[in-house]
Image: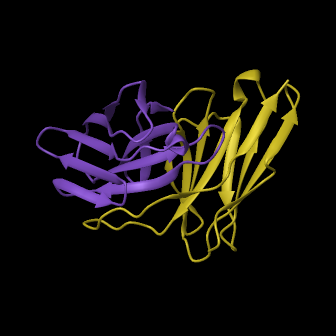
């Protein structure tokens, strides 16, 4: 089975940097996704890591360590619009198994 | 670019009624997934279809059924609705991922908000 753990909520200040962690235990590993979800809206894709290391995409970066079962999403130069839930997810046979999501609040 | 389309966007039903949710995947995507997301919960996988055949099944109640049609659109049929069925229902589509290949991103539709009174 899959077990995915991430903090329930985080608060950060506009313009700052925040790191959202995700640990997972999976039977087999096929990569890890990060999605952003604003309240009442659809999850939108942020990143997919299948190899160890850091992948940078604009203000967002995602890191993976397969040996540690650990990933993080790094958000730089935070903006108010970044207030959302951030979900890490692992694929299992094609479907996605989501963590419970981290609710990020960006304060002025 | 075309996105996943879901209809209706909002639906209000009474207990024991039935509901049908529709999903139109991104053109050329061959796999459709249905997820249920309760208030404050993460999306839970219900069922998926690949090339019109059921490919995986999750925590979908027996009262629910789904199918994918020849034009690749999918419908989720829900009967004997219960209060606990009130949730956001997302459809997602992707190109199928083969063994040994990295997984393809799932694109989510805007969701159908079902309220059961």
Q: Position of residue A79 (x, y in %)?
A: 48, 44
Side (left or right) of A65 relative to A24:
left
Quadrant containing the N terminus of chain A in the rendered view: top left
Side (left or right) of B103 relative to B21:
left
Residue drawn at the location 67% of the way across and 57% of the way down: B67
Side (left or right) of B68 relative to A34:
right
Q: Position of residue A2 (x, y in %)?
A: 32, 35
Q: Is residue B100 visible?
A: yes
- Where residue B72 sits, quadrant-wise, is bottom right
Residue drawn at the location 65% of the way across and 72% of the way down: B2
Q: Residue furthest bottom?
A: B28
Is residue B83 shown above or below B100? above
Q: Colour of chain B?
A: yellow
Side (left or right) of B12 relative to A103:
right
Q: Residue furthest left?
A: A67
Q: Is residue B18 visible?
A: no
Q: How many discs mark residues in the rendered view?
A: 0
Q: Position of residue A94 (x, y in %)?
A: 41, 55
Residue drawn at the location 20% of the way across and 54% of the way down: A54
Identify which residue, B105 or B85, lies in the foreground: B105
Residue drawn at the location 55% of the way across and 44% of the way down: A81
Q: Position of residue A39 (x, y in %)?
A: 62, 37
Q: Colour of chain A?
A: purple
């Amino acid at each position: 089975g899959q077990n995915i753990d991430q903090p329930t909520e985080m608060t950060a200040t506009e313009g700052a940097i925040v790191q959202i962690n995700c640990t997972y235990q999976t039977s087999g590993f096929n990569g890890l996704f990060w999605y952003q979800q604003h309240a009442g809206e659809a999850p939108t894709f942020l990143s997919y890591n299948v190899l160890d290391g850091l992948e940078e995409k604009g203000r967002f970066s995602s890191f993976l360590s397969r040996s540690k079962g650990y990933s993080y999403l790094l958000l730089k130069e935070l903006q108010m619009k970044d207030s959302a839930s951030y979900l890490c997810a692992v694929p299992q046979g094609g479907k996605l198994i989501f963590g419970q999501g981290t609710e990020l609040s960006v304060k002025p | 670019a075309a996105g996943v389309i879901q209809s209706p966007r909002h639906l209000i039903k009474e207990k024991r009624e039935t509901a049908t949710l529709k999903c139109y995947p991104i053109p050329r995507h061959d796999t459709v997934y249905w997820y249920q997301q309760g208030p404050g919960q993460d999306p839970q996988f219900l069922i998926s279809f690949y090339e019109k055949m059921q490919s995986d099944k999750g925590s979908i109640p027996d009262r629910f059924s789904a199918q994918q049609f020849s034009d690749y659109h999918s419908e989720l049929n829900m009967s004997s609705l219960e209060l606990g069925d009130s949730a956001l229902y997302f459809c997602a589509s992707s190109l199928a991922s083969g063994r040994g290949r990295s997984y393809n991103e799932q694109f989510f539709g805007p969701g159908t908000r079902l309220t059961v009174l």
